[in-house]
Image (cartoon, grey):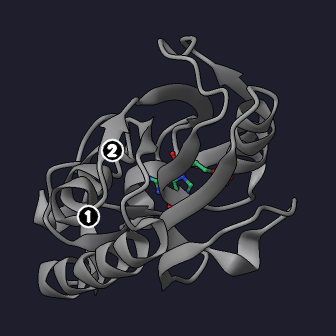
Amino acid sequence: MEKDIDRVLLSSEQINERVAELAREISAWYGENEVVIIPVLEGGAMFSKALSQLVNMPHAICPIKLSSYQGARSTKTVKLLEELSISLAGRDVLIVEDIVDTGYTLNFLQSYLRSRGVASLRTCVLLDKVSAREVHVDINYTGFIIPDEFVVGFGLDYRQRYRELPFVGILKREIYDSRST
Ligand code: 5GP
């Protein structure tokens, strides 16, 4: 498994430390307000679990499933795979996403959630590939800015593998270049 990693970009210690900092910032912002945390599955599940265990404000967790990536490439067509099970009208909503790359996924999700009449919408991403951005997205909390490389670990996969790695690493190019997608 680790032999497939070219280089560790963020160690598990660095990630845990940063998640704790983000949790403090987020808790300070919301105070006692109840928040709906929306983890973007599957990639955002590990990050949002770590974050939600550390934040102090009362919160509900309502994951959302979108599809936009095929193999190691972003697609511009984002789809909602399942409708949300609760009403968001008048609620304070926090999106928790693993990574923002071109921005198409978050851009779609932010418009979708705004159309549901939320009282406020904030976004927290663990990783931001700023240099790969193609459309604007509003981000309130960023864990790390990273280079435009295909990364795995801490929830991020390649063909459903590597999610469980406790660190974030750059996947060896030959692993995904040898595949058709
Ligand atoms: P965007 O729509 O911003 O291009 O892409 C966002 C989605 O693409 C993320 O939710 C994530 O699923 C996937 N993604 C983007 N970059 C990477 C990457 O480097 N590694 C992995 N595993 N997924 C990525």
Percent of width and height locating residue 18: 29, 84
Instruction: Look at 13% across and 65% down and name the residue there.
Output: 166
Q: Is residue 99 above or below residue 80?
A: below
Element carrying mark 2: strand
Observer-nearest of 135 and 177: 135
Instruction: Look at 55% across and 45% down and name the residue there.
Output: 93
- Decide if residue 8 is in sight here: no
Residue type highlighted by circle 2: His
Observer-nearest of 101 and 84: 84
- Decide if residue 161 is in sight here: yes
Instruction: Look at 27% across and 61% down and name the residue there.
Output: 51
Name the image quarter holding the C terminus. Answer: top right
Q: Is mark 1 within 8 Å of ligand 1?
A: no
Observer-nearest of 96 and 61: 61
Element carrying mark 1: loop
Disc 2 marks which residue? 59
Percent of width and height locating residue 109: 69, 38
Q: Is residue 117 above or below residue 100?
A: above
Disc ID at residue 177: none
The answer to whether marks 1 and 2 mark residues whose Cβ atoms lie closer than 8 Å is yes
Residue type highlighted by circle 1: Val
Disc 1 marks which residue? 55
For marks 1 and 2, give the CA distance.
9 Å
Q: Is residue 25 above or below residue 79?
A: below
Observer-nearest of 35 and 111: 35
